[in-house]
């Protein structure tokens, strides 16, 4: 290619580079479209049929609990809020030397997918996955503990 033929080619390359820069600068960032963190609130609840007392902090969710579970007493053992990146596990210590591990693994259709494990001596003794609607909650039953069972009331929020 001679010198005269190169000039239109160089102009085309400059034009494409400028156009690409303008498009890149004006387009929304990928991170704005896909949140990189999930806020997760977990209530660890001791449920029992030996008692009829209900922890005052659980009164709001007791109708939901009673519609699914056949327990008469509910005690809040602990509540923890975790801010986790996708694929980042969060851990909560449980009674009987167990650990609850929650990992947000992805999102689809306004729902957050969690991988949930209960570990004892770093070995999974329970594992499940849930798909939780953004800014909603779900309660899942856990292992026996004391005179009842543990329940996990999980709420997830993506900005």
Image (cartoon, grey):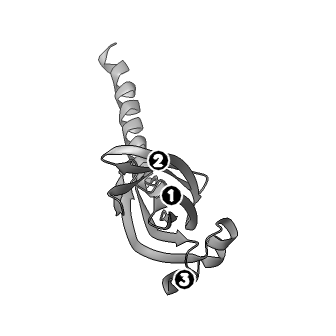
Residue on which disc 3 sits:
54
Dot 1 falls on a residue whose secondary structure is strand
On screen, residue 53 above or below 108: below
- Residues marked 2 and 1 touching at CB (< 8 Å): yes
Q: Earlier in the sequence, mark 1 or mark 3?
A: 3
Q: Is residue 128 above or below residue 7?
A: below
Identify the residue under disc 2. 126
The residue carrying mark 1 is 142
Residue under the point 44% across and 64% down: 40
Could you tell which of marks 2 and 3 lies nearer the N-terminus?
A: 3
Query: In this image, 107 relative to 80: left or right?
Result: right
Q: Nearer the viewer, residue 122 or 90?
A: 122
Could you tell me how far apart the alpha carbons at marks 1 and 3 are, in whole angstroms? 19 Å
- Determine the secondary structure under disc 3: loop
**Numbered tag placed on residue 11 in the rendering:** none
Q: Is residue 46 above or below residue 33?
A: below
Q: Position of residue 49 (x, y in %)?
A: 58, 72
Assess disc 1: are there few (<14), some (14-19) or many (≥20) residues with their C-alpha within 10 Å of its C-alpha: some
When asked about the image quadrant of residue 94, the answer is bottom left
On-image quarter of the N terminus: top left
Residue lying furthest bottom? 56
């Amino acid at each position: 290619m001679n010198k005269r033929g190169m000039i239109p080619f160089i102009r085309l390359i400059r034009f494409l580079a400028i156009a690409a820069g303008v498009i890149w600068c004006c387009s929304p960032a990928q991170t704005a479209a896909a949140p990189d963190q999930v806020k997760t609130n977990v209530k660890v609840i001791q449920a029992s049929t030996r008692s009829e007392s209900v922890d005052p902090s659980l009164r709001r969710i007791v109708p939901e609990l009673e519609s699914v579970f056949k327990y008469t007493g509910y005690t809040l053992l602990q509540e923890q809020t975790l801010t986790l990146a996708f694929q980042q596990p969060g851990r909560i210590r449980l009674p009987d030397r167990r650990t609850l591990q929650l990992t947000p693994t992805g999102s689809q259709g306004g729902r957050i997918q969690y991988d949930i494990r209960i570990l004892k001596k770093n070995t999974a003794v329970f594992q499940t996955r849930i798909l939780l609607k953004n800014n909603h909650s779900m309660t899942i039953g856990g292992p026996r503990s004391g005179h009842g069972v543990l329940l996990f009331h999980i709420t997830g929020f993506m900005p």
